[in-house]
């Protein structure tokens, strides 16, 4: 025995089936249009943005492995023929690459560690005392500092570092930390306000001091945002040209970006040497970002959502 649903008045069995099929087909076509349609303006913009990065990178790679004669033949997009590493050898010797690389690593390391520590300390104090005007207005003061780039304050900073005998890589690293502090505190504060205060209160009930609460409980929870802040600080320090060129008085202690300037003056026609030097200088930053870019996106997104 089979059971059938009663038909509505004035509707036949065949007509009902056809109506259901028509509704399903219409729904399927609508879903297909929604899911299969491409946003072409956005796609075109993304393709142009990708090409604006990939094309210069391709030219840099090809020019770095060309000979001097081939690098000046006017065809920048041709492949190296023959394949040569003479540009890297000359760039290594002209820039004294090991020394300049060590100076850049030294400045970047101090910048990363100092930024993470100072920004986390400051953000912890602000986030846990937000109801007090002094801490709240301190946060706004730090945010206002984001609108003061180094070139605006260059003259005063050069004078002060000279008086304090910090016209060296240490002074450059300290200034890097100071100029990274505002943005880093903003990220840390947004992340800290998502951590329940009850966790810290339970630790204090067990007898933990403020320092123990921070180091044993809060700071480990800041690991994703610490990675994000550290990566931003590293990239800003490694790629900076203006600050080291103005602050460091000893040419032997200059960072890699500053030493690249010589290829725009006295070696301006040695394109293969110039591009080989540029590639060696930016390779560490590219490698670090490729390895850690998932932490950058995860940290920023997690902090924004929380």
Image (tube, rainbow, N blue to C red):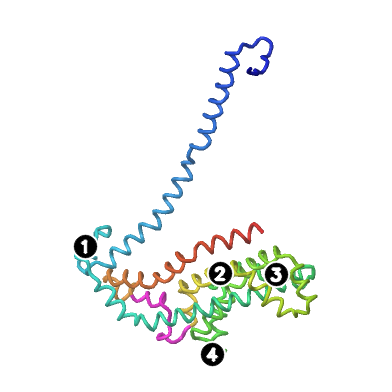
Q: Earlier in the sequence, mark 2 or mark 1?
A: 1
SS label for mark 2: helix
Which one is earlier in the sequence, the residue at label 3 or at label 2? 3
Which residue is drawn at the image coordinates 63% and 72% (left, top)? 220
Is 181 above or below relative to 305?
below
Query: What residue did someone put label 1 on?
Result: 73
In the picture, which quadrant includes the N terminus? Answer: top right
Crowd class of label 4 (few under 14; some 14 to 19; many from 20; radius 10 Å): few
The residue to which callout 3 is attached is 139
Judging by the rendered image, the residue that carries numbered circle 4 is: 165
Label 1 crowd (10 A; few <14 / some 14-19 / many >=20): few
Give the spatial CA distance, label 2 vs label 1: 45 Å
Q: Which of the two labelled residues, at mark 3 and mark 1, occupies the earlier sequence position?
A: 1
- Going 68% across and 74% down the picture, which residue do you hit? 122
270 to the left or right of 136: left
Marks 3 and 2, how far apart in space?
22 Å
Q: Which residues are magenta?
A: 248-262
Q: Nearer the viewer, mark 2 or mark 4?
A: 2
Tell me the distance, in whole angstroms, between the alpha carbons under discs 3 and 1: 56 Å
Q: Quick one: 50 or 306, which is closer to the camera?
A: 306
């Amino acid at each position: 025995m089979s059971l059938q649903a009663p038909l509505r008045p004035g509707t036949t069995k065949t007509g009902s089936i056809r109506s259901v099929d028509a509704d399903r087909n219409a729904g399927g076509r609508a879903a297909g249009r929604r899911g299969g349609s491409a946003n072409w303006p956005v796609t075109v913009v993304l393709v142009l943005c990708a090409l604006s990065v990939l094309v210069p990178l391709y030219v840099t790679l090809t020019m770095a492995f060309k000979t001097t004669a081939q690098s000046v033949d006017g065809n920048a997009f041709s492949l190296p023929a023959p394949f040569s590493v003479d540009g890297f050898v000359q760039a290594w010797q002209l820039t004294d690459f090991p020394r300049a690389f060590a100076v850049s690593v030294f400045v970047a390391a101090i910048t990363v560690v100092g930024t993470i520590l100072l920004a986390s300390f400051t953000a912890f104090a602000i986030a846990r005392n937000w109801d007090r005007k002094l801490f709240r207005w301190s946060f706004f003061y730090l945010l206002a500092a984001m609108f003061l780039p180094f070139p605006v304050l260059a003259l005063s900073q050069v004078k002060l570092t000279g008086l304090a005998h910090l016209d060296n890589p240490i002074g450059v690293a300290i200034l890097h930390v100071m100029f990274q502090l505002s943005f880093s505190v903003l990220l840390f504060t947004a992340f800290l306000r998502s951590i329940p205060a009850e966790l810290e209160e339970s630790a204090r009930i067990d007898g933990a001091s403020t320092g123990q609460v921070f180091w044993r409980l809060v700071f480990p929870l800041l690991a994703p945002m610490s990675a994000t802040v550290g990566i931003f600080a590293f990239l800003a320090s490694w790629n900076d040209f203006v600050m080291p060129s103005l602050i460091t008085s000893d040419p032997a202690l200059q960072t890699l970006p500053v030493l690249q300037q010589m290829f725009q003056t006295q070696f301006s026609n040695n394109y293969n040497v110039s591009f080989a030097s540029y590639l060696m200088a930016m390779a560490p930053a590219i490698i670090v970002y490729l390895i850690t870019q998932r932490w950058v996106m995860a940290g920023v997104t997690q902090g924004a959502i929380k």
